[in-house]
Image: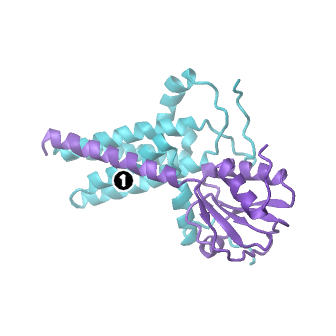
Chain colours: A cyan, B purple
Amino acid sequence: MSTASTASGATSASRVGIDPRGPRVVAGITAVVLLVVITLALLGLPTPAAILLGAQAVVFLIAAVLGVQRHPYGYLYKAFVRPRLKPPVELEDPAPPTFAQGVGLFVVGLGLVLHVLGVPYALVIAAAAAFVAAFLNSVFAYCLGCQIYLLLARVGIIRRKPAAAA
Amino acid sequence: MHPLLVVAVILALVALATALGFVWRSQQGRVRIGDERIVAIDGVPLGERATLLQFSTEVCSPCRATARVLGALADRTESVEHVDLDVTHRPELAARYRVLQTPTTLILDSYGAVRARIGGAVRRDLVIAELARVLEQKVPAA
């Protein structure tokens, strides 16, 4: 019998765990959206492609700012997928998938800006990069934050606290 | 672009991502031989006979599961400690020990020398085998 465990070992007291399958379904939907963007762009429909990628950027923004718990696609998961599944065996910290949404926003946003500036294939390349990350996340449970967050911390972009006396 | 060519590009992209996924998965939890350099980090007590030194950040979903596996292993193996270091606050440690992903686990012997290095989520059976090699004795599996 599987029982839902409460958030165990949460790093901060206020943080509530989330169903780990939610972000993976969200990433799957994101991957499909990005494939549609690439298809439209390659078929010679750059404007619809850019509008759809812009909409995806807004979705990334909402999830990155409000947290992955409020991800627009997450409501689809809660309404249609979650009721058909058993309760999660284990809950997960929302911080890693929220961080991944921010990375998605950065990549897609950069692609859109370059596209508007007239850089050829910017839309396709940005959407393809974001697709690979979303696909790996959804299918292989790849953790984007495990490499990129560490990298940002190492180069000094992320400093959560002022460095304690060495 | 011809629609058939577009389909081919999409399929190629999915195939590439799948191949990357399999490569990534095969690297997760793989044990590499350590370089035997001595680890000394201020404020970090080492185990008498061995230490499972884990590097984590807070933006890392597999870190918690790895901490649980290593913590349980240290709990029931005498003189073995598990240390979980958050390198967000100490990025110089990540640089010093060449940590490129979290979790990364170093298995240290009684001298604090790195005997094994594991990138990504650990696999319990592989850690047990490696710890037994370092301790030169069998490690209780349960």
Q: Quadrant of the C terminus of chain B?
A: top right
Left or right: residue B87 versus residue B26 is: right
Q: Nearer the viewer, residue B87 or B106?
A: B106
**Residue type highlighted by circle 1:** Ala
Counting every numbered tag in the picture gives: 1
Secondary structure beneath label 1: helix
State the residue at coordinates (41%, 51%): B20
State the residue at coordinates (85%, 67%): B48
Pointer 1: what residue? Answer: A129
Q: Quadrant of residue B116?
A: bottom right
Is residue A131 something one can see in this rendering? no
Left or right: residue A85 versus residue A106 is: right
Q: Quadrant of residue B86?
A: bottom right
State the residue at coordinates (33%, 45%): B15
Give the x, y percent position of residue B79: 86, 61
Q: Nearer the viewer, residue B35 or A37?
A: B35
Extreme residue toward the left, this view: B2
Give the x, y percent position of residue A4: 70, 30
Give the x, y percent position of residue B19: 39, 49
Q: Quadrant of residue B49?
A: bottom right
Extreme residue toward the top, this view: A84
State the residue at coordinates (13%, 46%): B1
Q: Chain of mark 1?
A: A
Report crowding for label 1: few under 14, some 14 to 19, many 20 or more residues within 10 A (C-alpha). some
Give the x, y percent position of residue A120: 21, 59
Left or right: residue A52 versus residue B97 is: left
Is residue B31 something one can see in this rendering? yes
Left or right: residue B92 versus residue A44 is: right
Q: Nearer the viewer, residue A34 or B13?
A: B13
